[in-house]
Amino acid sequence: MAPYLAAVRNYWALLPAIAVCVVLILIYAVPTLINPQWSSNVLGMFRQQSELQLGPKQIQSRRMLAGALVIAAFALIGFNVSLNREANGCYQAAKAWGAIDDKTQTADPCVDMIFGSFFGDGGGEVLEKTQQPVPAYQLVKGKKPKYLNWIQHRPSYDGLDLVVGIGSDCASDLKVIQGEDKITVLVDQTEPCPQSKDISVLPVKLKQPLGARKIVTVDDKPLEQINPDLDSWGSVLKKLATGG
């Protein structure tokens, strides 16, 4: 479903239309919930009729309709917030892995900026005489990163211990070497990886528990542990309200 949301999964694409719908709904629904006769009188003016008196059943049905419309208004707001949480989470994750901004990619970052690995699984021998470092990794335990649910070719949480993100140009040469005392992550290329506007995320299943083993890259330099994820609902609502 994710690719079909590209046109709307950003902060402002749906917000103006949703705002108009919500305001129109509330203009009708709030007075109707307080006193259904008010809205009946207003509608009666357009019908060129005198004041219409509503019976108990009509009052109840109109209040039920108004209540349903209020729920629908909140559902519209929730739908937009949900889409924005996904988009912002995928964007933050891609940036954390080193993606550079490109206006053609940011309309739906969950589709265009970050995806599961299509090439290679991190296995195989290291062939080059010199290798390139990998800057970061994300440990997957306890709280599973929600942004992984929304990316293309997403990895399964089953058996997933950690993930490593790298620019798509270097993804096929990413190697993960699992030793007894350390785990080494590197890019098996002689030239440095160029900056990329899209990131490939490689899922890694450890052959044995991580324990006290270090996660390092070229020259035994430690990798930074990062934890990008979706913003909270409150944070997204604040950004929508303030344009942040």
Image (spheres, grey):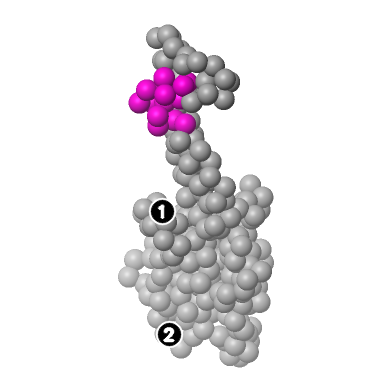
Left or right side of 145 for 124: right
Q: Position of residue 166 (x, y in %)?
A: 56, 74
| Image position, residue 32 (x, y; %) | 42, 26
The residue pinned by badge 2 equals: 220
Secondary element under disc 1, as helix, strand or loop, is helix
The crowding category of the residue bearing disc 2, from other C-alpha atoms within 10 Å (few below 14, some 14 to 19, many at least 20), is some
| Residue sitting nearer the eye, 15 or 224 | 15
Are circles 2 and 1 on residues that touch, CB within 8 Å? no
**Is residue 140 positioned above or below 189 on the image?**
above
Q: Confirm whether the magenta stretch covers residue 188.
A: no
Q: Is 34 one of the magenta-colored residues?
A: yes
Marked residue nearer the N-terminal end (2 or 1)? 2
Indicate the secondary structure of the residue bearing disc 2: helix
Task: Name the residue tied to disc 1.
Answer: 237
Which residue sits at x=57%, y=25%?
A: 46
Label 1 Cα crowd, 10 Å radius (few <14 / some 14-19 / many 20+)? many
Q: Amino acid at mark 2?
A: Asp
Residue 165's place in the image compared with 30, above or below, is: below
